[in-house]
Image (tube, grey):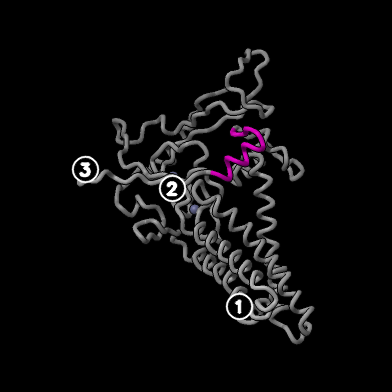
Amino acid sequence: MEWVVSFPQWRKDQTDKDDFESSEASLLGNYILCCGGKVKTAADPTNLARMIGVGLIIITPAVLFYIFDSNWYWEKSPAIVILFAYTWLLALGNFLLAAFTDPGTVPRNIHLSRDESGNSPPEYYNVIRLPGARKDGVFSPSEEESESNAQPRYPIEIKYCTTCHIWRPPRTSHCGTCDSCISVHDHHCVWLNNCVGVHNYGFFLRFLAFSILCCSWLIVLGFLRMAQDGGATKRPISLLLGIYGSLGILYPLLLLAFHMVIIWQGITTREYLHLTKEHQLSMKDVFRIWKFNPHNVSPIKNFAIQTNRQRVKRSRPPSNNTKT
Ligand SMILES: [Zn+2]
Ligand SMILES: [Zn+2]
């Protein structure tokens, strides 16, 4: 394995980017921030409008249900109305958390290294390759392999970000829309107007799951009332809610199914696209991408790791008034 690969051309190409100014604006990325930075969304008007549209798509059927159908179901059983409200609130809450939570922005570097010429050191334009899993996908760092029978390992690449001026941690990549490096970057979601990364991937998955549950409720409740209480002509809103749920369930269902496939293999959407392109894999290879994944452990552990990434608690500076 070549541990370090030099790309001198990169340095030439990126020289213009080295005019880095440590102004506050350049440090914050392309975000709109409020509540002291606890709430953030990308400063992208088109995607911001899409995100508001998704919010309205979530809110509208619940409003229609509670105006037109909830009384009828409340008389049948209050539990139905309460359970629908609970599912809907979880879908909306996880949507808001996925959209406005910091996805895992890696802070930019403001202490730049310069060589004698005032440019970034040439080694910053190298790609460092660390050993990953073996070719058969089994990670065994303690196993001794002789040169003769060693199998190629798929490497973990470490690159320098010429925009954020940091060495990106593994699985981190730069999002052009957010103008920031995102840890365990899955993708930039135009419907959330936010990246999906280490801190909000769980919210994103739960949003999809509860959206599917919510749509299932709409299908059942809409068509049930229509069938039992006068038909489509007498209950057009119930019919509308049934159709709304039937159409609305398709996209989150397909998206969640795709994410289940890649979660068990321990890869992100970005890595999926990269690996399929690099190894020229087709759709029928979708279940064996784990073999090329340097982060692969086992299906169960992959699932646990991908779905249970913890939010990093922000440490507070020690108070001067603290008495010991
Ligand atoms: Zn970056
Ligand atoms: Zn982004």
Residue 168, image x, y percentages: 45, 38
Task: Give the extent of the magenta segment.
Answer: 295-308
| Secondary-structure class at tag 3 | loop
Spatial CA distance of label 1 from label 2 is: 39 Å
Label placed on residue 109: none
Name which residue type carries label 1: Tyr
- Left or right: 128, with 256 as reference point: left
Q: Which one is in front in this view, the residue at disc 1 or the one at disc 2? A: 1
Mark 3 or mark 2: name the one nearer the start of the chain: 2
Residue 207, image x, y percentages: 58, 58
Mark 3 or mark 1: name the one nearer the start of the chain: 1
Say which residue label 3 marks: 323
Name which residue type carries label 3: Lys
Say which residue label 2 marks: 105
Name which residue type carries label 2: Thr
Residue 304, image x, y percentages: 60, 41
Image position of 106 with respect to 204: above or below: above
Q: Which residue is depicted at the point 33% across and 36% down?
A: 119
